[in-house]
Image (tube, helix red, strand yellow):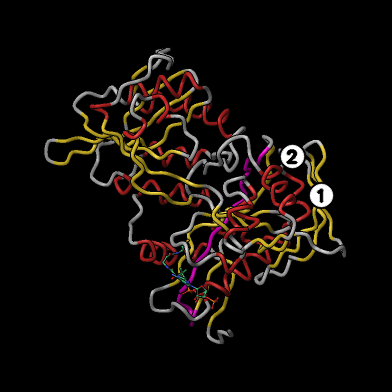
Amino acid sequence: MTLPEITIRSATEDDAAAIRTLVETSFGTRYDPPELERVPRLFPQEQAIVAVERGRLVGHVQSTTMTVTVPGERTVEVCGIAGVGVAPTHRRRGILRAMYTEQHRRIEAAGLPLTMFTASEGGIYGRFGYGPATRENAVGIDRRFAEFLPCVPNPGGVTLCEPSEARAAAEAIYDRWRRVIPGAQVRPAANWDILFDDPQRFRHGGSDLFALLHADGYALYRFHRHDRLTAAEVVEMRTVTGEAHAALWRTLLGLDLVQRVEAVLTDHDPLPYLLTNPRLVRTTARYDGLWLRLMNLPVALSARSYAGELDVVLAVSDPFRDVGGRFALRVRDGQALCEPTTRAADIELGIDVLGSMYLGAVPARVFAAANRLRVKNSARLHAMDDAFRAERDAVLGWFF
Ligand SMILES: CC(C)(COP(=O)(O)OP(=O)(O)OC[C@H]1O[C@@H](n2cnc3c(N)ncnc32)[C@H](O)[C@@H]1OP(=O)(O)O)[C@@H](O)C(=O)NCCC(=O)NCCS
């Protein structure tokens, strides 16, 4: 689609007020004053792209380079995209597509092998080659009935403290945690500032933050009052040992006067299996966190390590950027060699499917069952599943 009236260009300082209005309108929220200073530190304004019609700003996308962990405890520099909005007066006429075309041209020129973001809606981004790459389960636990099994450690070691006192220790624990968790990013100071500023718009009527600290983990949570029943919402919990996980959950599930504890767990969080009644950990919603796209297949596929040997030719389709084609992927001792090839393909798939498989969140066989990954030889499908499996569940480290 051509957009004769629309100019796509880099943002300048003069655009700041119009960007704020557009982003606040797009997401239906107002930034609290401290956030206004923090966000440009996370996403440098000069790196943002805007769409302008006759001098008026009608579209915006911002980005920054992030260091993210991939399977095998390796890190990769990737592009993180955020703040995507098109004015409600100008939607569905190709402005997002035009901004994304320019954004991805720049990412390619910068040589970053992966891009990622969090998505407001699930139906928009497959066409741009993105697949959901982490899975999250919102759970509610009626803690009044929660009992730990006798075999579960009761190590103690949790201290109550004010969030400001917990911050330095939490930063150090997060940094240990993110080094081993696929999908977790290095966290900049500006994002820690926002977390501990605890803006009103994040509270949804709840209290300000409370903190629990252990040598190998922390939990930040808030209370919600509905009539006389109170819920505790775990806003962020990171643990690097099973002991810290058990100790913090024992404390959270010991919060007398609270009926319900709410948290977000990955698929393989052990919490249900610490309890005599695992069904108490009720999943109330299930959603994606991170969306991921491969920009340079040989570089991206060689960046992570693999859990099994592999020798396949992938035919990857990429209608958006056309970086697909046929690639030979050979894995030995966990290490991949990936290069373009003219050999016949064993497996056909979209680049969005590869995005969902990259951190190990969705196995190849699930996409094969959906006919989004086509393979003639089932042994190759099993080999793909084995190889792409990650040792730990992928998690979005900090939301952006
Ligand atoms: C989402 C948003 C950015 C789309 O902008 P837009 O300029 O209307 O999008 P475009 O016209 O360029 O559409 C690009 C493609 O995405 C599709 N698309 C756009 N919005 C969609 C939606 N909400 N659901 C499904 N498909 C959508 C279009 O049909 C189009 O498809 P095609 O190019 O394959 O034909 C805009 O609606 C918006 O600002 N929404 C509110 C804020 C938001 O959700 N931002 C995204 C944060 S991740």
Q: Amino acid at mark 1?
A: Asp
Q: Which mark is residue 311?
A: 1
Q: Quadrant of the N terminus?
A: bottom right
Q: Could you say which is closer to the camera, residue 319 or residue 55?
A: 319
Q: Which mark is residue 190?
A: none
User: Residue at 61% of width from left, 46% of height from top?
Assistant: 66
Residue 141: % across, % down: 30, 34
Dividing the picture into quarters, in which one does residue 393 lie? top right
Q: How many marks?
A: 2
From the Cβ of disc 1, is ligand 1 less than 8 Å away? no
Tag 2 secondary structure:
loop
Tag 1 secondary structure:
strand
Q: Amino acid at mark 2?
A: Gly
Residue 349: % across, % down: 68, 62
Compared across the picture, whether 252 is left or right of 170 comes to: left
User: Marks 1 and 2: CB-CB under 8 Å?
Assistant: no
* Residue most extreme to the right: 342
How many neighbours does mark 1 have within 10 angstroms: few (below 14), some (14-19), or many (20 or more)? some
Q: Which residues are magenta?
A: 53-71
Compared across the picture, whether 350 is left or right of 397 comes to: right
Residue 215: % across, % down: 48, 18
List the residue tagged with mark 2: 308
* Residue most extreme to the left: 227
User: Residue at 62% of width from left, 46% of height from top?
Assistant: 359
| Residue 64 located within the stretch drawn in magenta | yes
Q: Could you say which is closer to the camera, residue 45 or residue 263?
A: 263
